[in-house]
Structures are given as structure tokens and as C-alpha cells.
Amino acid sequence: MPLIDSHCHLDAPEFDADRSAVLARARAAGVVAQVVPAVSAASFPALAALAGLEADVHPCYGLHPMYLAEHRDEHLAEVRRFLASGRAVAVGEFGLDFFVDGLDADRQRALFMAQLHIAREFDLPVVLHARRAVDEVIATLRRVGGLRGVIHSYSGSEEQARQLYKLGFLLGLGGPVTYERARRLRRLVATMPVEHLLIETDSPDQPDSQHRGERNEPAHLGIVVETIAALRGVEPAEIAAATSANAVRLFGESVSGPQACGVLGG
């Protein structure tokens, strides 16, 4: 049952002490690829080095809104430079966050728009952060046009989800869906079109209900799959196959992983 973690921050300092062991556990759990989005220009070189060492780590480069204080206009040139240098599978993580106090909304919008245009320039998908900002993200995607990607850790409504499907976007779901109190999210995943679903861990953040309060890691991805399968009344292997195929369709054949050949069409 090959799995693709469509959103994992394996380059985060929380993994510095045991990153090799984390990767080994992920591979043993059937995770054949991890899409790892950067959050700031300062993190680009280390992520590129990690991806150069580990064939199943697939980098994305972008400027995350929660790190707004670190971003400079010249960092957009760094996004372009790292995207042009090789193995990037997407632009990200970037977007809008109107939940955290003190993040200048107009500055966020300017960086958001600039990175959307970079994605169009490179013909790459986008990995988007949208917290209390889903309507504005949808409106902006419509205005720019010609984009594809995923809304990571989706927390919007079913109607917003339908609008995103029409734009060709996918929804990334992870640990939060495993909590029974997440009733709206669980209703959504039970009935949404499976071709718009990606699975993720957002490691080291957003652990599932079985690892509450612990550092999250990609090896736990199967718990997300089992939860979604139970909510949809299907076998976990069906969700694994569908979401892995979706990830390959969005990010490209490189994320299929050697173990997935023949299963995902790699």
C-alpha cells in the first residue's frame, strides 16, 4: 500500500536529531515519497541539500505567510532561482493567513499574488496555506487563472470545497480529520470526490488522534488513510491508491517512488 505524504516539513529543526530514522520509519510504513514545502528563503539551501541526498524527498520553494517578518522582496528572486535549479515539484508553501494577529494583510496579498505568477511562469502547481482566508484565496485564483494545486490542511466549508474543485484544485487532509470533534471536516471527506483528495501529515505538526501531543512524522500517514477509508466505507488500499495517483497527477511522475511502479503508473 504505497503512500505519498503530500505535505511534510521534514527539513524542520524538530527532525535534526533523528531525520534518518524518521525517513527509515516512513519507508517501512509504505511512504514512498514526501513533498516537502519550504517556508522561508533561509530554509531553501538546506531543503535542496536534503532532496539531493534523499530521492524520496521532493522539494517545493515558497514564502509562508506566517514567516512574513523574514521575507524580503528580493526573496522572490530566490524562489525563482531554486525553482529553476532542478527538482522542485511545486511552488509553496505560501498563501494567506488572517488567523494569526500581527500579519500585515496587504503585504501577505502582495507576496501571494507574486508567487501565483511565479507558479504560472514555471508551470508548476501551488501548495497553498489558507486560514480564515479561503474565500479570498478562491477569488484570487479565479482572477489569476491558469493555476493548479492543493489547499493544504483544508478547513473550509463544503461550498468552498466545491468552488475549489471547479478550479481544478485538490484538498490536503491529515491529522485533524482523525479527531471525532472535527465533524464538519469528517462530513466533507466522507462524500467529497476522491479525485480531489490528497493525504498529508504536516509533520512535525498536526499529529493524529493516536499521537496527540507528540511530534508528528510521515510514518503516521497510514492512520489518516484508515480514518478516511472508514468514513467513506471503503478499504484503506482504495484510499491509498487514489490519493497516490492524485499526487502523481499533480506533482509529476517523480513522486511515484520506486516501490509504487506498476501501482501508480510510475
Image: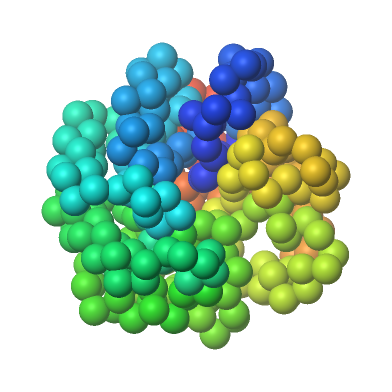
Q: To which quarter of the image does residue 213 belong?
A: top right
Question: At which x and y percent is residue 150?
Answer: 44, 59
Q: Residue at x 19, y 51 (%)?
A: 73
Q: Residue at x 48, y 71 (%)?
A: 98
Residue 220 shown left or right of residue 58 in the figure: right
Q: Nearer the viewer, residue 54 or 78?
A: 78
The image shows a total of numbered marks equal to: 0
Quarter of the image where the N terminus is located: top right
Residue 118 shown left or right of residue 141 in the figure: left
Quarter of the image where the C terminus is located: top left
Above or below: residue 97 compared with residue 259: below
Residue 206 shown left or right of residue 45 in the figure: right
Name of the residue lying farthest toward the front: 102
Name of the residue lying farthest toward the bottom: 159
Above or below: residue 155 compared with residue 143: above
Q: Is residue 262 visible?
A: no
Q: Residue at x 46, y 38 (%)?
A: 35
Q: Residue at x 53, y 32 (%)?
A: 12
Q: Nearer the viewer, residue 119 or 255?
A: 119
Q: Is residue 256 visible?
A: yes
Q: Nearer the viewer, residue 256 or 139?
A: 139
Question: At which x and y percent is residue 157?
Answer: 59, 80
Question: At which x and y percent is residue 110?
Answer: 24, 66
Q: How is the image coloured?
A: rainbow
Above or below: residue 10 compared with residue 116: above
Question: At which x and y percent is residue 153?
Answer: 57, 58
